[in-house]
Each structure stands twice: as C-alpha cells, then as structure tokens.
Amino acid sequence: MKIGVLGTGMVGETIASKLIALKHSVIMGSRTVDNPKAVAWVKKNGENAAQGTFTDAAAFAEIIFNCTSGVGSIDALKQAGEKNLNAKICVDISNPLDFSKGMPPSLTICNTDSLGEQIQRTFPETKVIKTLNTVNCKVMVDPALVPGVHDMLLCGNDDDAKKKVTEILQKWFGWKSVIDIGDITGARVTEMYVPLWVRMFGVLGTPNFNFHYIKG
Amino acid sequence: MKIGVLGTGMVGETIASKLIALKHSVIMGSRTVDNPKAVAWVKKNGENAAQGTFTDAAAFAEIIFNCTSGVGSIDALKQAGEKNLNAKICVDISNPLDFSKGMPPSLTICNTDSLGEQIQRTFPETKVIKTLNTVNCKVMVDPALVPGVHDMLLCGNDDDAKKKVTEILQKWFGWKSVIDIGDITGARVTEMYVPLWVRMFGVLGTPNFNFHYIKG
C-alpha cells in the first residue's frame, strides 16, 4: 500500500519503519524536502522508502499517518493540502502537548474540544481516525512489548474507516484488543488521558506499559 | 474509628454504609442538619450512624471522606471549618464535573490545576489524599465486582497519610493493587481521566469496570 507518514520525530520514524518492514511504500513527509532526519531514515530503509514535503507524502498516499507534534499538526496538514487529504483515512496519532513550561506537559486543547476534532473540522472530507496516541511509539507497532492482552482505543466518524484502521492495528501491528469508543469526540478523552500516561511513565519507570479494561 | 462522610449522594451513601458495615462510627454531613437523605440513611444504618452538618461531621471525625459533588466541594469544606479539618486526613473522592450542558459532563477545572490541588491549597494543614475518583462508587468499596487485579491510584503530599489511606483501601475496602502516583498534583491526571471513564461506561455498558496497568 502507498502510505504517507507526516512527521520525522520518534513517532513518525517508528511508524514509517514498521510500515517499510511490512513491505509498504512510504513517503516520510516534513516541512522541507531535504529534512536531515527524513534523509537518514530513507538511507536506512531501502527502495520502498522516500522523503518529501507534507504535500508529496499526502498526494502519494492512500492512507496518511499524522505523526507530527500536536502544536504543529493543523499547519502540517494544511501544508499537505486539503485536496490531497480528501476522502482518505488520516490516522491521527498526535497529542496536543505543550512542553514550553517543562515537564509535565500541559494540553493546548482539552475538555470541550480536542486536536482530533479540530483536524476533522478543518478537513471535513478526510476520515480522521484517532488512535495509538495512548501508548509509547514502540508499543504502537509492537504491542507484545507489554505482556498479555491490553487495549487500544479508536474513534472517528466513519465506520468503514474505523474497520480498516482496526484491521491495520490488528493485522499489521499485532493489537489483540481494539476498542471502538465512538465518534471523533472520543479524541477528547484519549488526549486527556495522556497526562495520566506521563505520570504512570514516571511511576512505572518504563515507557513499555499500557492499560487493560476489565469489566464485571 | 470516628469518620465524617461529607455528602449525601450515591457516593457518600455508599462509602458511609460500607464504613458502618465495618463497625466504624459515622456522621454523614450535609448543608443542613435534617437533610432527608441523611435522615433516611441513619434510619437504615443503626446506632453507629448519625447525621449532622458538614461542621458536625468534620468536628467528630478522625478521618474525613469528601464525597460532595466537585462544584460544591470547596464550599462544603469551608462550611466544615478549617479548624475541624486541620491535621486530619481528607480522602478526596470528588470530581470537578459540570453536568449543566448535559452529557457527557465537562470538567470545571483541568489541565494545569485540579480540584484536589485546590482543596489542598485552601486547607494547607489538611492531609488531602486523592483516590477512588476513577471508579463507580459500588466498585470503590467492593472492588471484587470487577474480576481479577485492577488498580486504584492514590496521591497526596503526606507520606504517612498515604500509607494510612492505602491500608484503608486494602484492608477495609479490599483493593489488591493500590498505586501511589506521587504528590497532590496527581489529582490533575486522575480527574482528567474521568471523561474517559464516562466514555468507557457507555462502551462497556456497565459501571462495574476498571483498568489494570501492565508493564513490559
């Protein structure tokens, strides 16, 4: 499949490398065509890997992964271009974290709105699916780093797109438990969960952890 | 032990009834001395149960459970009286939920502050321990309603108070896993978790559920 990964940070690199390992063709997109991190990533990842602008990556892609930092996501997607995003699935992994005042980060949007909803409103023809933003990037693509069954939440407005992304999570990345929490307003609750993730990272002493819901 | 339970709603009633069942002496406190819910609760719970004002409950108590609704908690505790709270443990179960615009509720405080922190700042001599606010009240006092091991988080500034409340959670209420997430700023992350709880309640179709953290 042809996939655009927006963002050259740890999340973008991890997702893009996993997709290459799965034999997909990936363009890693960034603000500039010669981003050094993207160049280095392409060198390591062979002939199915390429770099480009956000526009290049989105125009090429059948599915887009938004791995940009939350504060820059809307701008990055605008650079990608609405027509290159329309009718496509955008897997939104970003979190609206503000690290400007140090640790722990605060959220730039929360409570009655979310970044996932903002992206959906800004690009109404795109099928925004919020998921993966509740775990470390290594766990995103290798959930077996955490033993047993644990849960990945997913939300979005388009049922077919959710079904497709659920398959990606299960078959490509190996998630055993994917829970559909409804429409894109669910982004609010998973983004507001992230401060708890940060706290638990400090408590547990490893980024390789996740939650599992148990019901009576 | 002599315990003051502030609040006559479902949470207050459930906590107070459990404490009576454990043979403690409880005053259920509310704004007025003749609150009908408190009167009915006393009738059902025998000689160790009494009702009173917030002041009566706090003055009587060795430990206080704040089970008031979040929007009214600071006022309720002010009515209880600072001198009646000083040097005592206040187990803060409240959540700053705003139901005025319907479901789902939003938070009246979040992100860079929390109700737990506000209570601690308002009553600096009180040992505020935030816990139990991440599960339904029935699960609070009967965690076995959810099978297996699942987690209760706890935070606060006073280590001895946290140790005491951890014992209460384990020995009185039956919690197998109690995780100390640090100082009272942890209230921020557990209160911001509550919107996810509300969402999962809709998804799972029962209030009897909880999360368990698994690490690699």
Image (spheres, coloured by chain):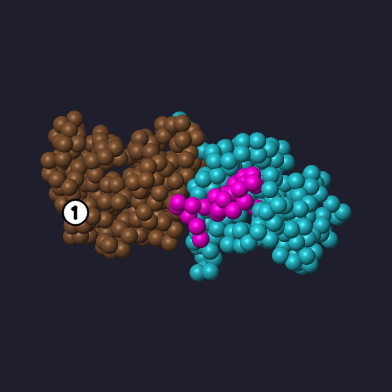
Chain colours: A cyan, B brown
In the picture shown, does residue B167 fall above or below B13?
A: below
Residue visible at 68% across and 54% down in the picture: A82
Residue visible at 54% across and 48% down in the picture: A187
Residue nearest the observer in this picture, B69 or B148: B69
Percent position (x, y) of residue A37? Answer: 75, 65
Circle 1 residue: B80
Is B119 left, or right, of B37 in this rendering?
Answer: right
Q: Seen from this angle, which residue lies furthest right?
A: A47
Percent position (x, y) of residue B33? Answer: 12, 44
Work out whether residue A100 can be spotted: yes
Residue visible at 23% across and 55% down in the picture: B75
Q: Seen from this angle, which residue lies furthest bottom?
A: A101
Q: Which image quarter holds the N terminus of chain A?
A: top right
Residue visible at 18% across and 38% down in the picture: B38
Q: What residue type is labelled 1?
A: Ala
Q: Mark 1 lies on which chain?
A: B
Is B134 left, or right, of A186 in this rendering?
Answer: left
Please tell me whether residue A126 belongs to the stretch shown in magenta: yes
Please tell me whether residue A174 belongs to the stretch shown in magenta: no
| Residue density around tag 1, few if under 14, some if 14–19, many if 20 or more, within 10 Å | many
Percent position (x, y) of residue B48? Answer: 17, 37
In the picture shown, does residue B201 fall above or below A39?
A: above
Q: Give the range drawn in magenta.
A: A108-137
Q: Which image quarter holds the C terminus of chain A?
A: top left
